Amino acid sequence: MRRCVLLKHGEVVLKGRNRDRFEAQLRRNLRASLRGVGTPVRIETAGSVTVVSSPRAPEAPVTELVRRARDVMGFDVVQPAVAVAPSPEVVARAAVDLLRERTPVAGGFAVRARRRDKSFPLRSDELATLVGARVHDELGLPVDLTTPAVEVAVEVDRGAVHLSLDRLRGQGGLPVGCSGRAVVLLSGGYDSPVAAHRAMRRGLHCDFVHFTGAPYTGPASAYKAYALVRELGRYQPGPRLLIVPLGAAQRSLATAGAGRWQIVAQRRLMVRAAGELARGWGAAALVTGDSLGQVASQTLSNLAAVDEAAPLPVLRPLLGWDKKEIMAEAARIGTEVISQLPDEDCCRLFMPPRVATRSDAARLALLERRCDPDRTVRELLARGRMVYPGRDDTGRAAA
């Protein structure tokens, strides 16, 4: 038996004439994810299934292959499996060996067979019956086709038959990079990392900008942003992060009389700066973690005021999510623990006692005439520091 991993394609199978382009991007992302796994890896695709194996190591590190493959956007299902010769007798013997490894099995079993290669001598139901009878006779396990404790998946492909006992959830969605590029405005909270993950899941390659309160705050939020981008880098190759000190610009807005509109004015400045950065990086949109009505600054009026200042479309994947949903997703994708770390959020600097829930266009226009936002954006980006989480600062892969 040769150990391998079966990856079932998701939405890409519905792409019609563009399917080849999507699948090519999916393979590139998979290769990038498996780089450095410690053994040569073979990737073979037939129809809507990709098989990952190691030709030089039959007992390949399947656990590590599975872990990495589950982070690749575009695969709905990930199945650790074994590949055997396309012989009914060999398949039945392999099923017994697999279940013997899994014993004790508390309950019954079922065999689900699927014959993609129609030249195989048995039909799917005949193969399932043969394998089930052999398992029952040799291991004494009861058959339960309704609520089995374990299912043996038998998939007949050209040149090999794959057997697996586990069906794990993949990330689903579209391959990262097939929908273009975006820049994520990353805070240190729960929301924006989850929004970034959702954007990646829709095929966007994401780079990041993080605004700190420097020089009025310490480096904690920058370290936290670095850690978040490094974690999100599991889902796409090569994310970049620009860390921008916003404190001086925030103070200028407060001095110019922003008052209750301080938060909205800051957000308008952030999207202006992020938009200029995105143009330089070849990105076509911005992504934020806004959730409608979650905080006072995220009212419909205020979000519209922010959009008005943005030079590119602002995407809000979490607009209809509540906080519990966002926190649950943060736990699933691995960013929750980092988001819980203490930091000094730049949005709390110069915060007025009451935040405006309805924007005043005339007031914001007057405020921005006093502060020259175009010059401020240039200065902000000039002071920004580029880092490559997971790589050294030249952009090369870190050892």
Image (cartoon, rainbow, N blue to C red):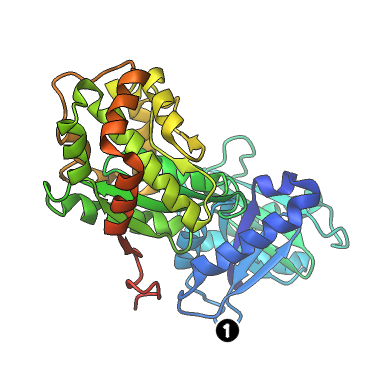
How busy is the neighbourhood of tag 1: few (under 14 within 10 Å), some, or many (20 plus)? few
Which amino acid type corresponds to the residue marked 1 in the rendered image? Arg
Image quadrant assignment for residue 232: bottom left
Residue 56 vs 77, above or below: the answer is below
Residue in front for this viewpoint, 306 or 135? 306
Q: What SS does tag 1 mark?
A: loop
Q: Is residue 95 visible?
A: no
Asked whether, in this view, residue 17 is left or right of residue 209, the answer is right
Residue in front for this viewpoint, 322 or 216? 216
Residue in front for this viewpoint, 370 or 108? 370
Quarter of the rendering occupied by the C terminus? bottom left
Q: Residue furthest bottom?
A: 56
Q: Residue at x 81, y 50 (%)?
A: 17
Q: Residue at x 27, y 40 (%)?
A: 189
Asked whether, in this view, residue 298 is left or right of residue 10, the answer is left
Q: Position of residue 298 (x, y in %)?
A: 34, 24
Image quadrant assignment for residue 79: bottom right
Q: Position of residue 284 (x, y in %)?
A: 54, 47
Quarter of the rendering occupied by the N terminus? bottom right
Residue 54 vs 134, above or below: the answer is below
Q: Position of residue 343 (x, y in %)?
A: 16, 45
Residue in front for this viewpoint, 109 or 152? 152
Asked whether, in this view, residue 9 is left or right of residue 14, the answer is left
Q: Residue at x 30, y 20 (%)?
A: 363
Image quadrant assignment for residue 300: top left
From the image, tell me which residue sits under label 1. Answer: 56
